[in-house]
Image (spheres, rainbow, N blue to C red):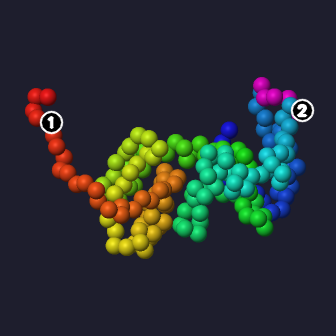
Amino acid sequence: MKIADFTALKEPLPHWRDHLALWAASRQPGSLPLDRCVIDLRAPELEPARLVDRTGLAQIAGLAPDDLPHPRYGRRSLPVPQTETAEGPRWSRPVARDWAEEGSQADWQEVRRAVSTVAEIEYAWLVAGSADMVVLMRLRDTRHLRDVILSRIQSLPGVARTETLLVIDEVAHRPAVLPPPGR
C-alpha cells in the first residue's frame, strides 16, 4: 500500500453529516450494506511511539545514519515527515519503507544521464562491487572538490552516498596495451 501526501483540514468539514447522508443516498445497487461501510479514521502507524527518527529511517533503508540525505548540504530528498519534534523529524514506518524502496530502485540509466551532466567529471564507469559507479575528477583544490561533491554529485537522483579517494602519488602510468590481432 502506497502512502499519498495530503493536507488535512484544520477544522472538521462543515455539515459532514450531510455529506455522509448524500454518499449513503447515492449508493449503487449491489454495494455493501451500510453496516459494513465503516470509515475508520484511526491510524495506529501515526501514534508517536511508532514513528521513527533519522536513525530508524536509515535502518529501514539499510543505510548508516550519516549516509542519509541532509538538507544542510542541499540534499532534500528525505520523505516529508509526519511530524516534527524538538529532537527532529519523525516518519511513519510505511512512509519510511516506501522511501527506502523508491531509493533502492534508482534507474541506472537516470543516474548515468545525471552524472554525465557534471562537467568536472573526466571519466565515469558503471562497476560491479561495493560501489555502483566510479568517477574520476581533476579539480583545482579541496574547496572545489567539496563544492562539486556536496552541491552537485550528492544531489543527483539515485545517489545515496559517496566516498572520496584522493590520489597522492602516481605509481605507474602505462598506455593501454591491446592484444595482437587474431588472439
Return the residue nearer the eye: 23 or 139: 139
Q: Are marks 2 and 1 in contact (CB under 8 Å)?
A: no
Whether residue 33 appears in magenta in the rendering, the answer is: yes
Q: Which amino acid, by three-letter code, is at mark 1?
A: Pro
Quarter holding the N terminus is top right
Q: Is the residue 181 above or below the residue 177 in the image?
A: above
Q: Is residue 4 left or right of residue 20?
A: left
Taking the view exactly as shown, the residue that stands out farthest to the left is 181
**Secondary structure at numbered mark 2:** helix
Residue name at image x 11 percent, y 35 percent:
180
x then y, percent, for residue 73: 55, 68
Return the residue nearer the eye: 154 or 146: 146
Could you tell me what secondary structure mostly forms the magenta stretch?
loop
Whether residue 46 appears in magenta in the rendering, the answer is: no
Q: Which residue is mark 1?
A: 179
**Secondary structure at numbered mark 1:** loop
Disc 1 residue crowd, few under 14, some 14–19, many 20+, Cα 10 Å:
few
x then y, percent, for residue 82: 73, 56
Disc 2 or 1, which lies upstream in sequence?
A: 2
Alpha carbons under labels 2 and 1: distance apart: 79 Å
Residue name at image x 37 percent, y 45 percent:
126
The image quadrant of residue 54 is: bottom right
Regarding residue 137, the answer to whether it shows in the image is no
x then y, percent, for residue 143: 43, 74
Q: Which amino acid, by three-letter code, is at mark 2?
A: Asp
Q: Is the residue 10 above or below the residue 109 in the image?
A: below
x then y, percent, for residue 155: 49, 60
Quarter holding the C terminus is top left
Magenta segment range?
30-34
- What count of labels does the image hold? 2
On residue 35, the disc is 2
Q: Is residue 48 left or right of residue 154?
A: right
